[in-house]
């Protein structure tokens, strides 16, 4: 019985047992891609109550054989990359399990597949829609390992896992809602791993990206990750710097808000404002914070930030 068959069998069994009422699982529809490529089980372990399986696709194996990396690595060791990947997901899943409202057992299994997508294009990791699979871009993870930059993959691993959770609870959400929820989760994880000062001093510069048209911040449509990351940064920074107020300590308030919004089934701005009201976050004028106010405050700070970092 080959490994590909075992993997397919495991996933199909889980899709039957997971409960169709939770979300529509498309895992089985994704397997033609993996069947063409082929996959090889590298390791299986329990992390925060979740069965995590790490696979290496045949196309990724071919890229490794050709040493088609972004950084030279004549002494490449697969075990080292596997450990780097699992270490990142271990810290991310452990933290996610500590957050309110979502318990580790809510996601019984997670399948990580190392893939080759060629060059330095695309996301470092990606979740196919409505699945419990996270595809890991071989050369991007390898580059982060060689350059000792775990903060990039730690951000990516928890961001993508938040999508897995999001698909379970709110399968019909828009991309705007889905990505913004994951952005808040990634920010919390950076604060936990590296501290408040690291987040405040580095998040916009290293992770957020440049907004080419700041006026798009006012749009309810998804217009790229930089807009969402600058919005999230403004909420974090204004709470941490006491510009916005909360009824409790700042970090637990941010955690409560993040999980409330992640699982909120209301559309975009309505859901965002509903979560702000539920968690009781107050703006600089003493009113309940709204998305409209957060967008305005984000816009007002953008010109100053980008003028300092040109």
Image (tube, helix red, strand yellow):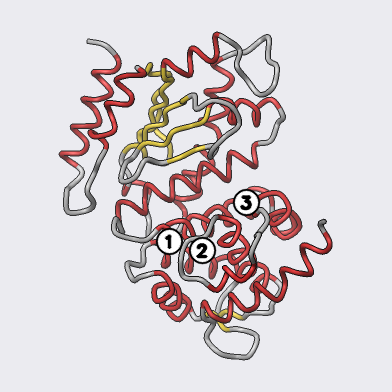
Quadrant in which the C terminus is drawn: bottom right
The answer to whether the residues at label 3 and label 1 have Cβ atoms under 8 Å apart is: no
- Residue 50 place in picture, x, y as percent: 36, 38
Mark 2 residue crowding within 10 angstroms, few (<14) / some (14–19) / many (20+): many
Q: CA distance from mark 2 to mark 3?
A: 13 Å
Q: Residue at x 36, y 18 (%)?
A: 37
Q: Is residue 263 above or below residue 133?
A: below
- Residue 13 place in picture, x, y as percent: 18, 32
Q: Is residue 68 above or below residue 154?
A: above
Q: Is residue 152 above or below residue 81?
A: below
Mark 3 residue crowding within 10 angstroms, few (<14) / some (14–19) / many (20+): many
Mark before the other along the chain sequence, 3 or 1:
1
Numbered label attached to residue 190 = 3
The answer to whether the residues at label 1 and label 2 have Cβ atoms under 8 Å apart is: yes
Q: Residue at x 46, y 50 (%)?
A: 96
Q: CA distance from mark 1 to mark 2?
A: 7 Å
Q: CA distance from mark 3 to mark 1?
A: 17 Å
Mark before the other along the chain sequence, 1 or 2:
1
Quadrant housing residue 15: top left
Q: Is residue 174 left or right of residue 300?
A: left
Secondary element at tag 1: loop
- Residue 249 place in picture, x, y as percent: 59, 72
> What residue is disc 2 on?
255
Q: Residue at x 57, y 22 (%)?
A: 81
Mark before the other along the chain sequence, 2 or 3:
3
> What residue is disc 1 on?
100
The total of numbered circles placed on residues is: 3
The answer to whether the residues at label 2 and label 3 have Cβ atoms under 8 Å apart is: no
Q: Nearer the viewer, residue 63 or 53?
A: 63
- Residue 240 place in picture, x, y as percent: 67, 70
């Amino acid at each position: 019985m080959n490994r590909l068959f075992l993997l397919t069998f495991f996933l199909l069994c889980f899709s039957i047992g997971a409960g169709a009422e939770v979300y529509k699982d498309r895992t089985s529809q994704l397997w033609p891609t993996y069947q063409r490529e082929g996959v090889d089980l590298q390791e299986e372990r329990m992390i925060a109550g979740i069965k995590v399986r790490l696979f290496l696709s045949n196309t990724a194996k071919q890229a490794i054989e050709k040493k088609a990396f972004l950084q030279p690595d004549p002494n490449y060791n697969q075990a080292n990359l596997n450990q780097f990947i699992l270490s990142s997901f271990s810290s991310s899943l452990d933290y996610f399990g500590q957050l309110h409202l979502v318990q580790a057992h809510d996601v019984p299994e997670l399948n990580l597949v190392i893939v080759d997508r060629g060059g330095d294009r695309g996301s470092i990791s990606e979740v196919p829609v409505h699945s419990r699979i996270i595809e890991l871009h071989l050369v991007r993870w390898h580059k982060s390992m060689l350059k000792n930059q775990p903060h990039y993959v730690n951000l990516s691993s928890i961001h993508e896992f938040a999508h897995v959770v999001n698909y379970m609870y709110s399968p019909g959400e828009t991309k705007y809602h889905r990505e913004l929820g994951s952005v808040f989760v990634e920010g919390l994880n950076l604060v936990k791993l590296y501290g408040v000062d690291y987040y405040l001093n580095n998040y916009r510069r290293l992770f957020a990206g440049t907004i080419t048209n700041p006026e798009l911040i006012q749009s309810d449509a998804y217009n790229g990750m930089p807009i969402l990351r600058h919005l999230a940064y403004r909420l974090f920074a204004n709470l941490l710097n006491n510009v916005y107020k909360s009824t409790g300590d700042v970090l637990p308030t941010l955690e409560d808000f993040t999980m409330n919004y992640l699982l909120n089934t209301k559309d975009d701005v309505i859901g965002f404002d509903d979560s702000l009201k539920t968690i009781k976050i107050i703006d600089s004028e003493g009113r309940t914070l709204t998305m409209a106010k957060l967008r305005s405050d984000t816009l007002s700070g953008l010109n100053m930030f980008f003028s300092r970092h040109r």
